Amino acid sequence: MKTAITEMFGIEHPIIQGGMHYVGFAEMAAAVSNAGGLGIITGLTQGTPEKLANEIARCKDMTDKPFGVNLTILPTLTPPDYPGLVKAIIDGGVKVVETAGRNPVELLPPLKDAGIKVIHKCTSVRHSLKAQDIGCDAVSVDGFECGGHPGEDDIPNFILLPRAADELDIPFVSSGGMADGRSLVASLAMGAQGMNMGTRFIATKEAPVHENVKKAIVAASELDTRLVMRPLRNTERVLTNEAVERLLEKEKRLGDELKFEDIIGEVAGVYPSIMMEGDMDKGAWSCGMVAGLINDVPTCQELIDNIMSEAEAILGRMQGQMAA
Ligand SMILES: Cc1cc2nc3c(=O)[nH]c(=O)nc-3n(C[C@H](O)[C@H](O)[C@H](O)COP(=O)(O)O)c2cc1C
């Protein structure tokens, strides 16, 4: 299938694996790219330019297909060395960067000068338009369903995607709640040129995370995610567990008085224990409602091949219905 996104990124299928903290290592990105999608290494999981350069080199050893790097721009007093991370990306010969979080305008000049395509992930039409205005090449439109940070507007993709299609001139992919061929056809119908998936890619054979994480996603239904940190306007969709229920109880009890320090134990620095050691109640970890649609742990190749053949079958069936 050829779309503006497959052509822009030089990939076979219009399917992207979004950056994921402690999941988006070289093994994950290479498996997705080798299967014809666009795999993405998570820059901030590496943290320093040296480690990111090493991860990019490892990924290049595992695939000769294009892959990207995610740079999440966090509101923090002690920011990571973004210019150094950008330099590692450029020096590593990476061709695509997925930005997310705050406005990436300061990172764009060196990336654009190096001929790198930038896709910015955002959760609203106004932020998508801003990304277009500042020179991003594409947008990943992340609906309320998504795992991770859905923003504060709570607009699901059935509204957000057609709204983005009506307003944007640059290509965009759907993100949040995407799992299969039905998701891809629906995304295309709503004006997207491809789709981005997070949670679905964690439940794959190659995802370099503990088996408990994959089992938790397969066991979860669409009712099992919760929104945390809304009082701090830093809303995150996570899979419920003991720590999340404790966190929500604190949010309820402290109301407007809640501060980040009150919940630091449940949210800060918990990813290594969860993703690497499988300590599933250690803290809050991002997971999408799409867990309800995930019932297996295929290889990335099987997943992407199944998505493409299901999408083609649906399109064929629809054409048949139109002709009848
Ligand atoms: C465990 C996990 C960690 C994530 N970490 C990041 C991250 O560090 N940076 C980022 O931009 N997005 C992050 N995301 C969001 C994904 O890139 C993607 O936008 C989202 O998962 C899409 O929704 P879905 O899970 O319904 O497919 C994360 C998602 C998950 C599930």
Image: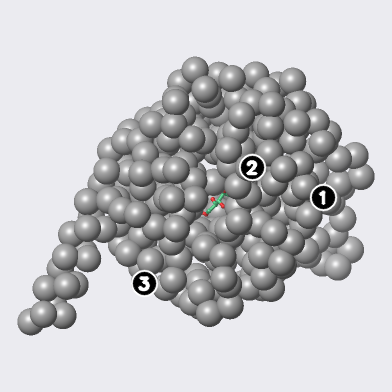
According to the image, label 1 marks what residue?
106
> How many callouts does the rendering have?
3
Res 183 → quadrant: bottom left
Along the polypeptide, which appears first: circle 2 or circle 3?
Answer: 2
Left or right, 104 with respect to 221, comes to right
Name the disc covering residue 91, or none: none
Q: Is residue 279 visible?
A: no
Along the polypeptide, which appears first: circle 1 or circle 3?
Answer: 1
Res 302 → quadrant: top left
In the rendered image, residue 149, in percent from the top left (x then y), is placed at 65, 56
Q: What is the CA distance from the residue labelled 1 to the residue labelled 3?
A: 34 Å
Whether residue 85 is situated above or below residue 147 in the rendered picture: above
In the rendered image, residue 268, in percent from the top left (x then y), is placed at 76, 40
Mark 3 is on which residue type?
Answer: Ala
According to the image, label 3 marks what residue?
189
Mark 2 is on which residue type?
Answer: Gly
According to the image, label 2 marks what residue?
115
In the rendered image, residue 238, in percent from the top left (x then y), is placed at 59, 52
Along the polypeptide, which appears first: circle 1 or circle 2?
Answer: 1
Residue situated in front as seen by the camera: 20 or 194: 194
SS assignment at label 1: helix
Residue at the (55%, 19%) spot, across then down: 58
**Residues under numbered marks 1 and 2 in contact, where contact means CB atoms less than 8 Å apart:** no
Residue situated in front as seen by the camera: 49 or 285: 49
Q: What is the CA distance from the residue labelled 2 to the residue labelled 3?
A: 30 Å
Residue situated in front as seen by the camera: 286 or 161: 161
